[in-house]
Image (tube, rainbow, N blue to C red):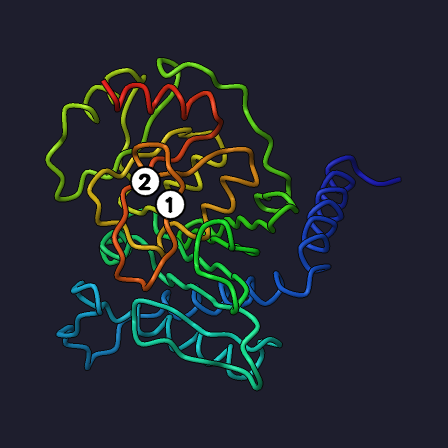
Amino acid sequence: MLDLTVKSNILDSVSTTIKETFMLSNKIFPHLHQLFIAVSQVVSQPPPKTWRGSQHNAKGDEVKWFDLAADEAVCAYLQKEFPYSVILLSEEGEPRQFGSGSPQFTMVLDPVDGSENFARGLAPAGMAISLSPADAPLAVETIEYAFIGNLFTQEKWWAQKNGGAFFNGEPIQPLPTRNLADILISCDLNHYIMQPSVNHLLNQTRGVRSFGAATIALVMVAMGKCPLHIDARHTLTPENFLAPALLITEAGGLITDLAGNSLPHINNLTDRFAVLASHNSILHALALECLQQ
């Protein structure tokens, strides 16, 4: 007869296998998962001794050695393993096509979001990938697949349009949070002079957090752990929010501009946005009311 501890471990292993099989049953997600593994492996290595750190990307941000290493790992996988033809958009270069024939998807990649955190060994930092049809305009509403991974904890989130949102294989369940006074709100404060309307909103909540990684902050909105996120700086770029936006909407939440309007179509990754993201429509309406006062 099996020891109860052994039996429990076996059941846990079977449960994990079932969850992973659910993800692997889709033809897209196994490859997005492999991209996350490839990025995680290369950024965990020591920096090259020859790195001098003098490069900047199209947004003007300093390029870290792990940004380039992650980008190279992704490109290598797309070239050799990815079964679909894609146009890759990332902050590390011009659009690049991988695969033969007409592109089927536009892939927006942020290999290391929260790079200043990651460079200092400070959590969180994440990798984000979104896929939309290549013949569709790039926008929140056209994203069909999304995958986000935490580079410190190896936690994984993914979502499919009209197919739900998942955390480590479990469906993300909406929480019945209805009051600002009960929640934590995240706000990106980097290089930001607080506006009175934003300050008013923050003061209505239980507390304020600033993660330094928009992708992970927005994932916390979808999970309901930090059910509101605001970035009022008008500097947020699309690779930071497209993947978690699908996670949020599939989990029952909303992501809009600061007036409650849908985010506009994206021309390129240097477009800048301000966003308000909420775990549910009630919190979103309460936040918008505060911002309008």
Local secondary structure at mark 2: strand
Left or right: residue 255 versus residue 67 is right
User: Along the line of sight, which residue is nearer the eye, 186 or 118?
Assistant: 186
Query: x and y percent of residue 266 in the render?
Result: 36, 58
Q: Amino acid at mark 2?
A: Val
Q: Which residue is farthest bottom?
A: 100
Q: Amino acid at mark 1?
A: Leu
Q: CA distance from mark 2 to mark 1?
A: 8 Å
Query: x and y percent of residue 210 in the render?
Result: 26, 36
> Crowdedness of circle 1 by 10 Å Cα count: few (<14), some, many (20+)?
some
* Residue at the spot of label 2: 275
Q: Contact, CB < 8 Å: mark 2 with mark 1?
A: yes
Question: What residue is drawn where x is 78% and y is 35%?
Answer: 4
Residue 190, picture quadrant? top left
2 vs 1, front mark: 1
* Residue at the spot of label 1: 263
Question: What residue is drawn where x is 56% and y is 81%?
Answer: 102
Q: Earlier in the sequence, mark 2 or mark 1?
A: 1
Query: x and y percent of residue 241 in the render?
Result: 38, 49
Question: What residue is drawn where x is 43% and y is 67%?
Answer: 39
Query: x and y percent of residue 117 in the render?
Result: 25, 51
User: Along the line of sight, which residue is nearer the eye, 240 or 217?
Assistant: 240
Left or right: residue 161 versus residue 131 is right
Image quadrant in which the N terminus is located: top right
Image quadrant in which the C terminus is located: top left
Question: What residue is drawn where x is 46% and y is 61%?
Answer: 137
The tag on residue 150 is none
